[in-house]
Image (cartoon, rainbow, N blue to C red):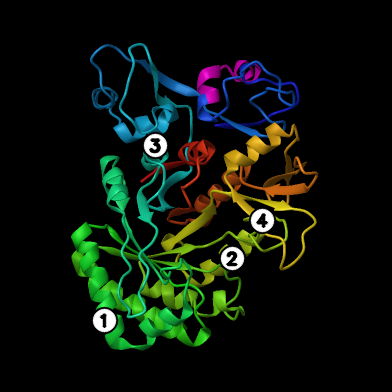
Amino acid sequence: MTIHVVSAGETAASIAERYGVSPRRLAEDNSVPEALDAPAGEAGSGLAVGQTLVVRFPRQVHAVTAGETLASIAERYGTTVRQLWRNNWELGGGDALAVGQDLVISYFEERLGTALSNGYAYPFIPRRLLAAELPYLTTLAPFTYGITAEGGLLPLADDGLLEAARARGTLPVMHLSTLTEEGNFDTARATRVLTDYEVQGRLAAEVLQTVLRKDYAGLDVDFEYLPGQLAEAYAAFLSRLRQLLEPQGRFLWAALAPKTSPMQRGLLYEGHSYGAVAAAADGVLLMTYEWGYTAGPPMAVAPLPSVRAVLDYAVTEIPAEKIFLGVPNYGYDWPLPFVQGVTRAQSISNQRAIELAREHRIAIQYDRQAQSPFFHYTDAGGAVHEVWFEDARSLEAKLRLIAEYGFRGVGFWNVMRPFSQTWLVLDSLYDIE
């Protein structure tokens, strides 16, 4: 894999020629519009100056013949249908083939190792997008089962997600949080569950019943905004869940706020004891994102120095092999000037960020310290905007941390928005479990 940063005047065709790869495949892999000969930075171009393109170099290619299927081709080359999907983004996780179509069987790549990949999705995710992403995911966690005021489970219409996941070899994971009917994390509901042993028992029993009835591979728990006095009770609740799940062959994961010290202040952090939660669970997701957020000032969503500070503390409390690195799959668009308490950034996809730069013919810049792309543009009403997002460079910098620290894998928040480079970089760096 090579990550190419587009310069003014370059075209998709000229870049493909430079690396000796197919222009069509380069464009499809990177979701570049079909204006392959329009120079970057000019009107009508499919490229923005400063955007990244992931270039992969095929080692072995197969031309489809009449009567062949993905299964028969995979068998012929000793690979899997899931790997064929990962090698050929344009398949979109589908099985439609055309005679003469070129399929990449393998690439010239030396991977860093093996990693487990988890993604979060709401039930309303577009099915075509979900189908394309599932081959890159070991597990899928539909978001989310909340908790009622009485301590029961709020239902989740996730049957479609479970069916799609299993059809593509991805394991579904139940996600439990303190989200209310209004979609907010609720400290009061968490408090009731964690302090009333009878209510907690009913919830735990209902969770286990749901896991078994829907055949989830495990449970992922995300209780946020817990006061410090509930830290011990939260870890004990997780232990109780694990004792129920383990005899059934199911695992337990838990999400952790991005702390840099054990005594970090703030409602987001105080109820999460890294050591206690890690001891109670089979795995933990570090939510290493949202430094740049809707109500905050413009900045990178996951600046690398901030991420590293969390990781450096985490490994002092948690075995590295239990840790999943949280990686954002989105960006933010802030109108300027920023006014604390007034300005609200819009959450956008990484792909939309590139489109904005292209539409306004603005060059994308890259912050070397934060390891994150950004740019400014002026909208039709004359307002200036600042955009921070993720591209192949920033994703590679984060994903390499998995091998560097010896982590178990990655958790993407979330997979609701299309960005093919997320998956191309992941598959280039790791053998996905």
Identity of the amino acid at label 4?
A: Ala
Label 2 sits on residue:
310
Q: Which residues are magenta?
A: 14-27
| Residue at x 69% of width, y 31% of height | 48
Label 4 sits on residue:
345
- The x and y percentages for residue 218 are 29, 61
Q: Residues within 10 Å of mark 3 (few under 14, many from 20)?
A: few
The label nearer to you, 3 versus 2, is 3
- Quadrant for the N terminus in the image: top right
Label 3 sits on residue:
128
Identity of the amino acid at label 2?
A: Val
Side (left or right) of 239 relative to 411: left
- Helix, strand or loop at mark 3: helix
Identity of the amino acid at label 1?
A: Gly
Is 300 covered by the magenta stretch? no
Residue sitting nearer the eye, 153 or 404: 153
Counting residues from the N terminus, which is met first, the one under dot 1 or under dot 3? 3
Label 1 sits on residue:
201
Identity of the amino acid at label 3?
A: Arg
Asked whether the residues under the numbered discs 3 and 4 touch, taking CB atoms below 8 Å apart as contact, a structural biologist would say no
